[in-house]
């Protein structure tokens, strides 16, 4: 097996995540699909790091993880405050910019 | 030894076996994340996929990232997701009705097209050989990462710290609620009840005597209709009230009929009882 298979797996996971974002309307599940896409990118970075034989790819994956952690904290806070005002976590209901 | 010499073409058979077995499970987990109806199930499937990705990181020589993936993603982020799912309501299942006609099929088409594009891109690239992380990890994976983070990427690292602090403050600002008025004490509430003259005694208890005494069953009024007052406000808002009034009234009707048969009277109304709104439909 060639490590390029990890890239194919990452592409597949990314595609599944992107489709999930388009299909689902529960904001939490949409958010989970975004996490899946970020994870797929990380896998691709790690596989590239191995192919090139240096650690830069792993550094980028590490920074992606930090950004994802910050993004999850803020995103979930937004979902919680949306749920408080609208009593629903559906992205269809949040059609206005104001609360 | 130069890098060209180190280049390899295939990984070990063990790693290939691990890839095919765990990769299949990872894809199944990802599909379950997308297609499970309840958010809790989606979150658990995603956690499984993330653990498998951590194993793949370890197999690729990214030892630090593999551990960080388990600690940060499955340990912190997924637990945060589960907490929010609990907060928002486990029973709030996604409505599966399409609001935009044909949106689901278009989305699937877009996804498949995107996947084909990605796969074609990777397939066209010439990626026959790879170097492996053996040389880069020679002094230890963590040491290698640290020397890169604190030299070449030190500016990005500093900015990351600022980002994390901003995110923490942002989350607190978004979820914090300032109390504009003092909460009423029990004494003030009872005084208010007396003054308004509504429901001076405690609210009636839920359940139908001698048959059902669960909290989600509304008590019946003398005319047989359920009383919303008897069920707690939380259950009422979630729409989780179980209505047994028709059942109870049908039982009562059957009992009366049997008694009348026994006493050899004619039945008054042989048909089963129906709620007024159902009968009017």
Image: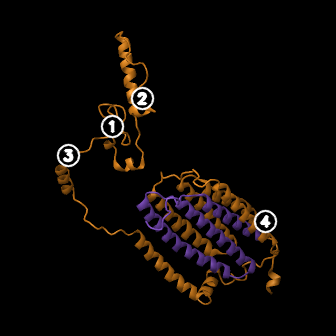
Give the left or right position of residue B37, taking residue B263 as reference.
right
Query: How many residues crowd mark 3 within 10 Å: few (<14), some (14–19), many (20+)?
Result: few
Residue B219 — which label?
A: 1
In this rendering, is residue B225 above or below B95? above
Kind of element beneath mark 3: loop
- Residue on which disc 4 sits: B13
Q: Quadrant of residue B213?
A: top left
Q: Chain of mark 4?
A: B
Q: CA distance from mark 4 to mark 3?
A: 77 Å
Q: State which quarter of the image contains the N terminus of chain B.
A: bottom right
What tint does the image give chain B? orange
User: In the rendered image, which residue does mark 2 sit on?
Assistant: B274
Q: Quadrant of residue B152?
A: bottom right
Q: Nearer the viewer, mark 2 or mark 4?
A: 2
Q: Nearer the viewer, residue B32 or B70?
A: B32
Q: CA distance from mark 1 to mark 3?
A: 19 Å
Which chain, by letter, is purple?
A: A
Q: Considering the numbered disc 1 on the image, is that residue within a helix, a strand or a loop?
A: loop
Give the residue pinned by disc 3. Answer: B200
CA distance for labels 2 and 4: 70 Å
Name which of mark 2 and mark 1 comes first in the sequence: 1
Disc 4 and disc 1: Cα gap in Å?
A: 67 Å
Disc 4 versus disc 1: nearer the observer: 1
Badges 4 and 1, same chain = yes
Q: Could you tell me residue B87's position as x and y percent?
A: 44, 59
Dots 2 and 1 on the same chain = yes
């Amino acid at each position: 097996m060639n490590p390029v298979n990890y890239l194919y797996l990452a592409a597949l996971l990314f595609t599944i995540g992107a489709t999930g974002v388009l299909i689902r309307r529960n904001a939490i599940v949409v958010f989970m699909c975004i996490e899946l896409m970020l994870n797929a990118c990380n896998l691709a970075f790690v596989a590239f790091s191995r192919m090139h034989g240096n650690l830069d790819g792993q550094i980028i994956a590490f920074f992606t993880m930090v950004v994802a952690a910050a993004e999850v904290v803020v995103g979930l806070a937004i979902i919680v405050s949306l749920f408080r005002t609208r009593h629903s976590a559906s992205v269809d209901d949040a059609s206005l910019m104001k609360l | 030894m130069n890098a060209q010499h180190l280049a390899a073409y295939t990984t070990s058979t063990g790693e290939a076996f691990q890839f095919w077995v765990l990769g299949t499970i990872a894809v199944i987990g990802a599909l379950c994340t997308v297609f499970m109806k309840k958010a809790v199930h989606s979150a658990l499937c995603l956690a499984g996929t993330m653990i498998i990705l951590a194993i793949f990181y370890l197999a690729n020589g990214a030892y630090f990232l593999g551990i960080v993936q388990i600690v940060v993603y499955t340990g912190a982020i997924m637990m945060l997701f589960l907490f929010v799912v609990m907060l928002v309501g486990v029973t709030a299942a996604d409505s599966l009705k399409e609001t935009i006609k044909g949106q689901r099929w278009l989305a699937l088409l877009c996804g498949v097209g995107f996947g084909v594009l990605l796969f074609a891109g990777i397939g066209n690239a010439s990626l026959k050989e790879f170097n492996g992380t053996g040389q880069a990890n020679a002094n230890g994976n963590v040491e290698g990462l640290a020397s890169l983070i604190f030299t070449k990427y030190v500016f990005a690292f500093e900015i990351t710290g600022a980002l994390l602090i901003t995110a923490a403050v942002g989350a607190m600002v978004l979820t914090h609620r300032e109390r504009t008025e003092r909460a009423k004490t029990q004494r003030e509430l009872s005084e208010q009840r007396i003054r308004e003259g509504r429901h001076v005694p405690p609210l009636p208890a839920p359940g139908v005597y001698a048959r059902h005494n669960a909290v989600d069953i509304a008590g019946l009024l003398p005319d047989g209709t359920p009383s919303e007052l008897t069920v707690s406000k939380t259950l009422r808002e979630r729409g989780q009230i179980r209505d047994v009034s028709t059942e109870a009234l049908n039982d009562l009707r059957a009992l009366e009929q049997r008694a009348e048969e026994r006493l050899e009277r004619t039945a008054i109304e042989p048909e089963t009882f129906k709620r007024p709104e159902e009968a009017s439909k």
